[in-house]
Amino acid sequence: MAGAQPTCSRCIMDSTVPGLRLDAQGACQLCHAHDRLDRAYFSGQDPDKKAAFLATIEKIKREGRGRPYDCILPLSGGGDSSWALVKAVELGLRPVAYHFDNGWVSDIGRQNLATMTSKLGVPLKTLSVPWEQLGDAFRACLEASIPEPCLPCLVAVFSLAYRAAEIEGLRTVIFSSSPLTEGIAPLGWSYVDGRYLESVVQAHGQPATLGAVRDFNRLRARNLLAGALVRRTRVIMLPLYLEWDEPRFKERLRSEYGWIDGGKHADCIYTPFRTQLIHDKFGFDLRRLGIAAQVRAGRISRARALAWFDDNPMVEDLENRERVLARLGMSAADYQRIMAAPPRSFRDYRTYYPLIRAMRPLIRQACKRGLLAEHVIDKFED
Ligand SMILES: [Zn+2]
């Protein structure tokens, strides 16, 4: 399928990844990063890692004694977060679900939020950023010509989860995403930090939007340090530790909870819009990330994954594009102008990237001492 272009012999990542490196066996650096994560976290049949994970869960329960809840669980209504809610309850945790309304939640997503929380008896709270500012931040990212149109949402999801932890006086946030299940985005495909978003909004957004972003942004260096050292916020990506078999858990969600499957990311109508935009403008297919993760985990064969892309060419959902543009207050001509603008990247904006690069020796030491997750450094190596 990739012709003469180099493709990883183990997963399906190819030369659309800037700086793809293959080892002597033909495996790429993202496969190596996957294996390091798998060894560090995934318990599988390893009794020691399983015991360590359950000990952490018990600690969270002890910390929550005398409080109405013991952890925050960000819930989108999609399959992964709905399943994380089920698993958290099965583990005996008492989560409070927090939904971040990013302005793009579909009707199915909204229905699933209500169904899952009421069936599991978990309270549901919502945090949002006024659409006037959030929509403007999304527009700014499009005008900025960067391959991260979802940057406002990514920063907000983490920020508002931290804020929820502050509001509830809790240390633990349980996330339903992980690089083991969703894939490892190479640096050239996706870069996220709080300073990046502020820089993009400053260049292309309204002044009031910058104020709103500064207000919710917890992905600034000082907030991250305060979160790690003072509040000691604990982030647990559940799929790093547990078997995460999507077809199987979706079946259980449907049959036992009445959850509705609207397809991948039906909980957010912006996701298919940005996947198409990135494909057409930046020349890479974000769907490869998740499929590559499934191949690495042995859930589907490499041959089947490659055939899937042949059978599922990117076909634009024009109706969805119109819906998204209307909500952003943009015209078809605006869209054409954005698509024609030369692609830019995080390197064209102010970010923490130079600081992270400079601190690599320190970060590597912290990884060795177990203070930081081992994979943190991987992304910044190229
Ligand atoms: Zn690979």
Image: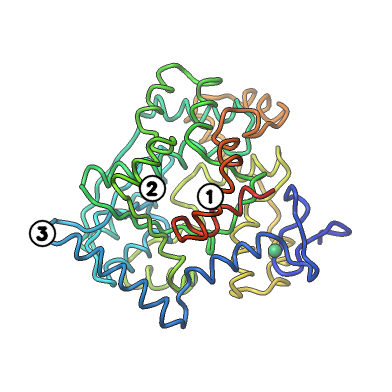
Q: How far, Cα to Cα, is label 1 from label 2?
A: 43 Å
Q: Earlier in the sequence, mark 1 or mark 3?
A: 3
Q: How far, Cα to Cα, is label 3 from label 2?
A: 36 Å
Q: Which residue has dot 2 on it? A: 107
The answer to whether residue 160 is above or below residue 374 is: above
Q: Position of residue 146 (x, y in %)?
A: 63, 33
- Given residues 177 and 57, the one toward you in this image is 57
Q: Position of residue 251 (x, y in %)?
A: 43, 72
Left or right of 23, for residue 325: left
Label drawn at residue 252: none
**Residue pictured at 68% horizontal, 50% vertical:** 285
Which amino acid lies under the numbered mark 1 shown in the image of this protein?
Answer: Ile
Question: Which residue occupies the extreme right position in the image?
Answer: 4
Q: Earlier in the sequence, mark 1 or mark 2?
A: 2
Which amino acid lies under the numbered mark 2 shown in the image of this protein?
Answer: Asp
Ligand 1 resides in the quarter of the picture at: bottom right
Look at the numbered disc 1 and say if its residue's Cβ is closer than 8 Å to ligand 1: no
The kind of secondary structure element at disc 2 is helix
Label drawn at residue 66: 3
Label drawn at residue 363: 1
The local crowd at label 3, few if under 14, some if 14 to 19, many if 20 or more residues have their Cα within 10 Å, is few
